[in-house]
Amino acid sequence: GDTAVECYEVSASEPFLTQSHCLTDASTRGVAMVPKLALDVLSCEVMRVLQLTDSCIVPISYQVPRKGHEFHDDLYPDTVGTTPAMSAEEWWQGGKKQPRGSSSSSPISTPSSSAAPSRSPSSTSGLSSGFLPSPSQNVKAIQNLMPTSKFRHIQGAVMHRDKHITNIRNLNLTTPGECDGFCVNSQRVAVPLAISGGQIAVFEQRSGPGRQPDSALPTIQNSVNVADLSWDPFDTHRLAVGDDAKIRLWQVPKGGLKDTLTEPELVLQHTEKIYSIKFHPLASGVLVSSSYDLTVRLWNLESGEQVKVLTGHQDQVFGIAWSPDGKLLATVCKDAKVRIYDPRKSTSPVQEGPGPEGHRGARVVWVLDGKYLLVSGFDRSERELYLFSADSLSSGPVASTALNVSPSTLIPFYDPDTSVVILTGKGDTRVYIYEVVPEDPYFIECSSFNSPEPHKGLAFLPKTECNVRDVEIAVGMMLTKTTVEPVVFRVPRVKKEFFQDDVFPDTAVWWEPALTAAAWLSGSNGQHKKLSLKPKDMTPSEAPKEAPVRKYLPSSVYLEEKTDEQKKDELLSAMVAKLGNMDDPLPQESFEGVDEEEW
């Protein structure tokens, strides 16, 4: 029934016991240890246990952090093999033989002789079956081919308590699965409350952090429970709220709410209850909504009129997303389909393809300059990520990766500047982070962030809120049962006095509209201006603008076995090259020392 796995190293001297702690996602019904010979020794795996939960078996791996993808003798002394040392009869008669391995269990064996029996590396040492310690040059060549991310060591951290909004009462923690739970912009936070009348609390970020009073707060009186809500990206005072059959537009006064708002500035009439709403990323005054009547509707907020009704869905619409250029709209549906619409030209989808089969929920977001769609959803049991080419949805996903078993839908946030996607679900404690790339393996996993307690939502602020001096690539607001807490995601760098231009390219000014609703609806397109995040007093790091081309080595590098004579020649040539010119100054003569913080 526990959710923690304790691991101890036992030694004959103090401290005698050294503890390692692992928190699991589900309660444990049983644990079994995997045999030593099944471990991945090239990844420095020293132990693996299998956790039995209510619905699945989860492997838990214990690895020792080591540099290099090679065999470490100090971690793997000779281990017991799989061949019995004696029969039952011999043991009853007092035999004390030790078990040893058999050379037949491995496809690679050492030459045998009458004096020394052959021993299989897989059965008598910690080496995995079929592997021998590789020459260092081949190991390095293999490492160079393995895709890695510059964000793999990304660190998430909750900011200091003086920036938290605390003592929030009566939070609505049961918003629909299509809703993010709350919404934020650079100025304020909107949080639905579990109070009759569909009330919404609005907190000012600049002046509002701290403990909220115990007395009642002024709120937005929405009349009915909130289905979804979203701030206008071009107006930090305008909040759109979808509910039973209406979309209400509210205008928050400057300085925040002083009195309860009861009259919206605009009401859009739907036919049935709303699923979700999304503002257009470039055109001001354009909104799209999905509803229980299985339609997706396009609205012109300048005129207050409905302009398009998109059809083709056979079941509940789980998620909608605009393309970065604002031309196309993607949807993911409970009928296991992903669709792309060109809403100004047709009310029917221009593309359609197979989506997640699970019926619990899904989300969609455009990635990699709008060339791909990332969909988070479910297969029969697990949460999964899928990557689709936006040019060929009918071909199915080009890649997918399974995460874990959990009932909540993963809500993705995509940063187009770094191609990093941050995902978490309502009620989760873990935040997953991946870099998405347009080639195999497509998803490169980075370090995850774990919150101290289950959170109810995670929403992100504009890029200008990031502290580039501390190499922050994303700043979010995390909703808990009674608080809103800022969370920062940083990339570890040594020389922080330099502007990390490989991490911070010019960013789109998406908080300013590129065109009006009337212009976009008439067929015009636009694009956002770009903004440099470099402070005037920082020097660029002059990092390469493009990643170096990956070099693929011929198979002969790994398969060819060199003779002893060839190895001697190579070693001699390397030593001569290392010696160089004896008149050259020694490296230590120009050594200036390293700052203490850089170690």
Image (cartoon, rainbow, N blue to C red):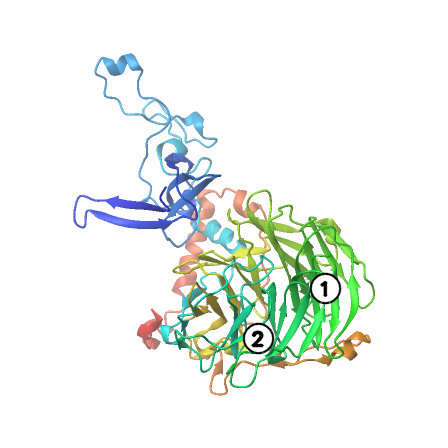
Q: CA distance from mark 2 to mark 1?
A: 26 Å
Q: What's the amino acid at mark 2?
A: Pro
Label number found at residue 505: 2
Q: What's the amino acid at mark 1?
A: Leu
Label number found at residue 390: none
Q: Quickly name the residue at label 1.
A: 329
Query: Vertical placement of 49 versus 503: above or below?
Result: above
| Mark 2 burial class by Cα count in 10 Å: few <14, some 14-19, many 20+ | some
Residue 343 visible in the picture: no
Total labels drawn: 2
Where is residue 331? Give x, y as percent: 70, 58
**Dividing the image into 4 quarters, which one contains the C terminus?**
bottom left
Front residue of 242/113: it is 242
Give the residue at x 50% y 77%. 218
Name which quarter of the figure residue 263 lies in: bottom right
Sequence-wise first label, 2 or 1: 1
**Dividing the image into 4 quarters, which one contains the N terminus?**
top left
Label 2: which secondary element: loop
Left or right, residue 187 beside residue 263: left
Left or right, residue 287 beside residue 116: right
Residue 536 visible in the picture: yes
Where is residue 280? Give x, y as percent: 69, 72
Front residue of 593/206: it is 206
Query: Vertical placement of 321 versus 362: above or below?
Result: below
